[in-house]
Image (spheres, grey):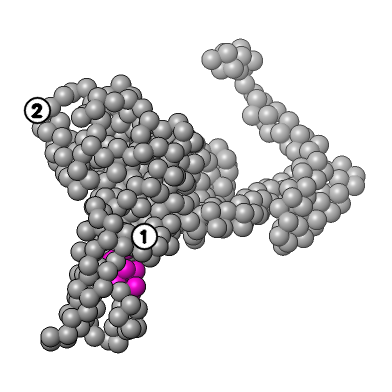
Amino acid sequence: MRLLNEPTAAALAYGLDKQAEGTFAVFDLGGGTFDISILKLEGGVFEVKSTGGDSALGGDDFDRALAAHLLRQMGLPEDAAGDRYLTRRVLDAARDAKEALTKLSATEVVIERGPGDLWRGTLTRDELDHVVKPVLDRCEPPARRALRDAGLEAKQLSGVILVGGATRMPIVRRLVASVFGREPLVDIDPDEVVALGAAVQADLLAGNARKDVVLMDVVPLSLGLEMMGGVAEKLIHRNTTVPCGAVQTFTTYADNQTGFDLHVVQGERELVADCRSLARFKLTGIPPMPAGMARLQVTFLVDADGLLSVSAREETTGKESSIRVKPSYGLTDDEVERMIRDSFAHAEQDVGERLLLVERVEADRILQATRAALAGSADLLVEGEQAAIEAAMDWLEKSKAGRDHLAMRAAIAALDAASKDFATRRMNQALAQGLRGQDIGAVESKVGR
């Protein structure tokens, strides 16, 4: 009936069970993945404030670390000298010992090295904690990042919900208490809480349950459009609550442009080349107009099921075009996490490249417009003006070839200043020609309207 992520389902189960209101962290450490979500419950509304995690981290990693420890105790290399059957038996023994040490302080480990050859040893909970700690420590950075993304401090949370079998381990619960500054909630079986929450949501959708609970999720990666120069313009930002939407108006870059090629992208990077391409569609049939005259209104809408609808409408003609895509299709949690990490790692470099490309596009635009004006209205130039404008254009060309966006911006401002009087005379001439032969009363009536 509807897809529901596991942490959200767990929060729904706890919210309905406890009748609680507040902000909760859902710490989901299963066999193969780790997810962390910050959710706000208020007035029967669940809102996912942020999400994160590590799709390559889970209880299986604890088993492998413990199995390697047991093999070393047996005097064998970590790959069991290539013996796959022994590796399997050691992994099974490691998992059994890990589960036993959830309640016991020590347990006996028996492993069959070969026919009639049994290895016996004792494993304590302290040993287990020491072995798995480097793996478990990987949970802390995503958890703290989720708090930052939600704009919260740990002390502002109302509680922490545990999900997944690995959260039964005492060391995991101690880590959660340390990171979030409170003991986690464990009233509901962590292996069943997701199924219970999903069942509650299905019952709600079927019309059999309470009607006063609303569930909201978030956009995992920003959604936007490609602009001139290969820059990504974000319309809906990461962690925006769904359903959601955004509207932005764009215009044409070149004179007599008769259409738009719209490229929908997803990601946190500033350049389209570093983002994920979602879809392309065209809007054609726009009458030729000077650059900057057309008005293209682009609307992004993400529905409750995570489907993105993008529509584009040229306001002067009413021409429309649209497309619908699923941003999450083919994208794993690991890829989402990698894209977010890359955006942090390259943030300064990306912003610099974006500023550079934006100024280059503006430089190209103003140079093109100035050349056209000089060619078409040379009679309006006064003595010495053309030389000053051309000198400013030469400076801008040289700046455009460099990598200093501030120098480019200064050169653009200098060209604007050098051509300001010339541009004013061209505007006055265009206005005079437009008004010539018209009745003053009719013009006043139009201006009044």
Q: Is residue 169 above or below residue 287?
A: below
User: Does the rendering let one see residue 85?
Assistant: no
User: Toward the viewer: 401 or 218?
Assistant: 218
What's drawn in magenta, residue-wise? 62-69
Q: Residue at x 21, y 39 (%)?
A: 188
What residue sits 20% from the left and 29% below the top? 17
Amino acid type, label 2: Asn
Q: Secondary structure at mark 2?
A: loop
The answer to whether 249 is drawn above or below residue 278 in the figure is: above
Choose between 98 and 18: the one closer to the eye.
98
Residue 323 falls left or right of residue 368: left
Q: Is residue 13 visible?
A: yes
- Kindly indicate the quadrant of the structure image that contains residue 293: top right
Q: Are marks 2 and 1 in contact (CB under 8 Å)?
A: no
Q: How many marks?
A: 2
The residue that label 2 is drawn on is 208
Query: At x 78% / y 50%, what residue is drawn?
Result: 411
Crowd rating for badge 2 (residues with CA inside 10 Å; few <14, some 14–19, many 20+): few
Would residue 340 be found to the left or right of residue 212 on screen?
right
Q: Is residue 449 left or right of residue 169?
A: right
Q: Position of residue 58 (x, y in %)?
A: 31, 59
The residue where tag 1 is placed is: 126
In magenta segment, residue 361? no
| Among the two numbered marks 2 and 1 on one chain, the one whose residue lies closer to the N terminus | 1
